DNA sequence: CGCATGTTTCGACACGCGTCGAAGCATTGG
DNA sequence: CCAATGCTTCGACGCGTGTCGAAACATGCG
């Protein structure tokens, strides 16, 4: 009686395999045109249009029209969080002796979670920052940047002073469902990820949300944060 | 393609108003008989039985047979977490100038979240414990109990040494969707809540998940944690 | 044993929604 | 201006599923 029907309505939007496929394709936070999403979901353009319209009306997606293309993206990080939380329910930590495809392994190892780095590598980076005392866990699911941390980021070429925090703070803790640990999100996490891309430390996989760490990337991670590739395999 | 259809399947189970009503009725972590859940959802016993069967098969519920009653409860805290996360999507912080019923207000003020204390009071208690230095926020969405904290709990009549942590630790951080802040969960949170019940500091509302703080309760909260009733209204 | 209560199963109905074919708009390019 | 491309709207089909009535099953009480 005192329950909001919102829950059912939101769940209903996610309750369709085609829609989940499209939402999953947008999990890295980037925007994609309708046609590509239709292909990702394995449905025709008409069907996809219908789905996208509903997700848009439901507030799960945002859209940007550019020429004759319409680019859809997740309405925000909360949507990504809901999807990751739902994914954590499944077969309840089933005994996954199952092979686990090569793609899935790469995804677990390193990927983009909305707009920041996740997977084992994302967690390792976050752990490294915590151990070096550059970051400390704070209340409200946030991280606090220490003086030493600000100095380190500056040395890496990121002027942390110019990054403005959102309403939710400068650095947030984001839960990773494959590893069940927190990793760095929020503006600070986004900027760090962008920096790693710009420096050629990591590269996007062409077809998926997976991310590859380059040899230079491993060198940087080892020298600055004490992360060894072998320790993550 | 590399997406698990689990997400859609789980979402589908939650995508029905009647099922959401039943799940919500179980959010306090207690078990309830099928008939009561049918009444809560406003459907007949047959319909409810069908829903409960599906939720059971989907791993969202657990059941315990006792005499001619069958008591259903949430399969675990993860289910409660999913529901709270989904609830946080809704109309995206709509301008709620809307009245907000008396029941809803009480629910926001203090309630049971699965098996521990939530709402403004739950958050205030957690904040108090943090400010006194009895608890500190730790990685992996946990709280760490300090020496001073252990002493305080002992003084309150809870031998913390006898509480055994689960796989996820002794004290966890649980996100509150009404206030968007963390509060104390996990074994430590459960024991504390039970203690407050046993000492007559808080009482369950007869019909809902809401909780009432007794005059004695306010006295205890004020003297031990510096929480004033007026500050929470 | 017979009756009442709580719960599940069976069957039938109807509504909703995902799907795609065909047509309609919008934009770009010759 | 016409053709091509990208996307959306319209219409129709079919399956799935939520709903309830009736009946079966299970348990507890005289």
Image (spheres, coloured by chain):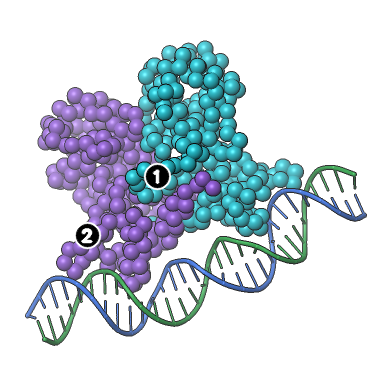
Chain colours: A cyan, B purple, C green, D blue
The residue at 62%/45% (across/down) is A72
Crowd class of label 1 (few under 14; some 14 to 19; many from 20; radius 10 Å): few
Report the side of B65 relative to B6 (left or right).
left
Residue at the spot 32% in from the left edge and 68% down from the top edge: B49
Percent from the top left, x then y, of residue A230? 42, 23
Do residues under tags 1 and 2 come within 8 Å of each other at their CB atoms? Answer: no
Dot 2: what SS?
Answer: strand
Evaluate whether residue A135 shows in this view: no
Query: Which of A215 and A68 lies nearest the eye of the viewer?
Result: A215
Q: Quadrant of residue B167?
A: top left
- Please state if D1 lies on the left or on the right of A209 as rendered: right
Q: Are marks 1 and 2 on the same chain?
A: no
For residue A98, the mark is 1
Q: Which residue was labeled with disc 2?
A: B64
Q: Where the N terminus of chain A falls, by quadrant?
A: bottom left
Residue A99: horizontal and vertical position, in percent? 42, 42
Question: In this view of the protein, which residue sits in the foreground, B55 or B192?
Answer: B55
Can residue A48 be spotted in the picture?
Answer: yes
Residue beneath the point at 63% across and 51% down: A38
């Amino acid at each position: 009686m005192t329950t909001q029907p919102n829950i059912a309505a939101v769940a209903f939007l996610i309750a369709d395999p085609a829609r989940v496929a499209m939402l999953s394709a947008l999990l890295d936070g980037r925007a994609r045109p309708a046609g590509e999403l239709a292909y990702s979901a394995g449905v025709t353009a008409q069907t996809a249009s219908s789905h996208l319209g509903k997700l848009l009306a439901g507030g799960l997606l945002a859209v940007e029209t550019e020429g004759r293309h319409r680019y859809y993206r997740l309405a925000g990080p909360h949507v990504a969080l809901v999807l990751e939380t739902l994914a954590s329910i499944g077969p309840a930590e089933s005994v996954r002796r199952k092979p686990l495809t090569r793609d899935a392994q790469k995804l677990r190892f390193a990927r983009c979670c909305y707009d920041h780095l996740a997977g084992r590598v994302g967690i390792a980076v976050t752990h490294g920052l915590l151990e070096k005392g550059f970051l400390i866990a704070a209340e409200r699911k946030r991280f606090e940047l220490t003086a030493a941390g600000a100095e380190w980021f500056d040395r890496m070429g990121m002027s942390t002073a110019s990054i403005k925090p959102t309403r939710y703070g400068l650095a947030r803790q984001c839960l990773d469902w494959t590893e069940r640990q927190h990793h760095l999100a929020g503006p600070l996490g986004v900027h760090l990820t962008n920096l790693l891309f710009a420096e050629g430390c990591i590269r996007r996989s062409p077809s998926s949300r997976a991310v590859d760490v380059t040899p230079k990337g491993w060198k940087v991670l080892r020298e600055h944060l004490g992360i060894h590739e072998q320790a993550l395999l």
